Amino acid sequence: MKPFQIIAFDADDTLWHSEDGFHAGERRFVELVSPYAADGIDVKAALTGVERKNLSILGYGVKAFGLSAVEAALTITEGRVPTSVIADILDIIYRQLTAPVRLLPHVPEVLAQVGDHYRMVLITKGDLIHQTHKVETSGLAHHFTDVEIVLEKEPSAYDRIFGKYGVPASEVCMVGNSVRSDILPVMALGGTAVHIPYPLLWELEHVDHDEHFAELASITELPAWLGIA
């Protein structure tokens, strides 16, 4: 058994599906807005550009996506977009906010197995209300001693969390799907990280790196990697 005090888990696209909902929303946005955009405009790229611009103001999550989508629709079409399209965009957002949590395969069993041997913490980023709702309705909250919802997953945020628990980063293992958010910041502090890719990754989560870390095909491989299978 690997000598960690804490196993920390990301939530979105590590424990439950998330990015597929955003991708569906983006595709629908392109369908709705393209008829009103000037020729030659890459509607999807324009939306991503607005999201990038707004990241430091709006942060992450469905609400941030929704505000950026409305702004992008107005900007791309130079105000020609009808109110019916704006209403459709808002409907996309409300549907995402109220959608039930869809767990990834075998997550409850793996968490139960890991929890028999380690203290487990959930660390996620995004909108406080929506992320809290997802945690509470997922049926997984009881597996974790603590839940941390942060604005940004950067080394200082992880350092603050680990410091609050009185555990050095070297005794923490972070499990997540995003190299940019879940893996590199923890490794920068001297911690261990396990990458479990999700089939979809938001453009703004892509990062170039030279780091080497463990990568598993599925969360089902985690107990064996930890030496508890």
Image (cartoon, helix red, strand yellow):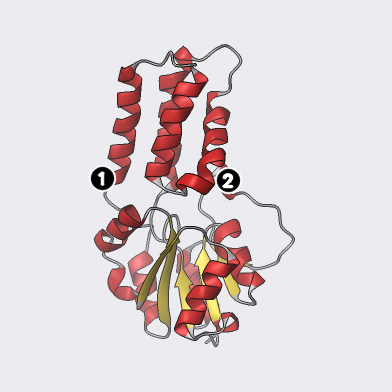
Residue that appears at 41% across and 74% down? 121
| Residue 101, percent from left and from top | 30, 53
- Relative to 215, is 73 on the left or the right? left
The residue lying toward the viewer, choosing from 164 and 226, is: 164
Res 204 label: 2
Image point (28%, 74%), residue name: 142
Q: Say which label, 2 or 1, has the lower sequence index.
A: 1
- The answer to whether residue 170 is visible is yes
Give the structural element (helix, strand or loop) at label 2: helix
Task: Choose between 144 and 156: the one closer to the eye.
Answer: 156
Q: Nearer the viewer, residue 17 or 79?
A: 79
Labels 2 and 1 touching (C-beta < 8 A): no
Find residue 79 and name its label: none
Give the quadrant of residue 213: bottom right
Q: Secondary structure at mark 1?
A: helix
Q: CA distance from mark 2 to mark 1?
A: 24 Å
Residue 228 can be seen, yes or no: no
Residue 6, image x and y in percent? 47, 81
Check the image and report above or below for 183 versus 173: above
Residue 74 versus residue 185 in the image, above or below = above
Image vertical order of residue 19 relative to residue 33, above or below: below
Q: Nearer the viewer, residue 66 or 57?
A: 57
- Rendering quarter of residue 42: top right
> Label 1 belongs to which residue?
98
Q: Amino acid at mark 2?
A: Leu
